[in-house]
Image (tube, grey):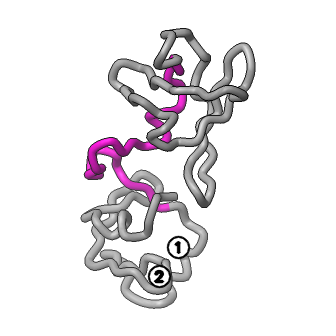
Amino acid sequence: MADSPEFLTEFENIYIDDKPVKVMSARIQKGNVIANLEGVDNIDDAIKLKGTVFKIRKTDARLENGRFFISDLIGLKAVDAETGADLGTVNDILTLPANNVYVIKGKREILVPAVSEFIIETNPEEGYVKLRLIEGM
């Protein structure tokens, strides 16, 4: 679960059942990551990993400026950038083909496309996201 398979090729270690596994090499093939993992030496070893969820440590990731992990955005206070009004909380983020959509739960549910026209400021350290809403949102 990442923005792109290229992102997943950048890690020296991945984690299987919270145990680190060294990535010997990784490349993209037809939109998938093909990785050579330490200790996975033959097809039988690889087949045993089928369906396994691989994880990374967030501290190992290098995100571009202005990019965030979805888990860091869930729970942020949503604030109207113009009025300062409390709109609720970022309850979910829908990952759609065109762009992500923030689901804000407050007095009512608001769906906000995650684009610069609507997302004015994102500050996970301070616990908020400032939004510009348009009529009908």
Q: Main secondary structure of the magenta part?
A: loop
Query: Left of 70 or right of it: where is 60?
Result: left
User: In the figure, 124 relative to 40: above or below?
Assistant: above
Query: Left of 60 or right of it: where is 97?
Result: right
Query: Left of 135 or right of it: where is 61?
Result: left
* Residue under pointer 1: 49
Residue under the image location 28 percent in, 68 percent down? 22
Which of 9 and 53 lies nearest the eye of the viewer?
A: 9
- C-beta proximity under 8 Å, tags 1 and 2: yes
Residue under the image location 37 percent in, 78 percent down? 35
Which of 57 and 27 lies nearest the eye of the viewer?
A: 27
What amino acid does circle 2 point to? Asp
Residue under the image location 56 percent in, 52 percent down? 99
User: In the figure, 80 relative to 16: above or below?
Assistant: above
Q: Is residue 74 highlighted in magenta?
A: yes
* Residue under pointer 2: 45
Whole-percent x, y for residue 31 in the image: 49, 79
Whole-percent x, y for residue 87 in the image: 60, 16
Q: Marks 1 and 2, Cα distance to the nearest angstrom? A: 7 Å
Task: Answer few, some or many: residues within 10 Å of disc 1's Cα (few below 14, many 20 plus, some between 14 and 19).
Answer: few
Whole-percent x, y for residue 129 in the image: 46, 25
Whole-percent x, y for residue 53 in the image: 53, 61
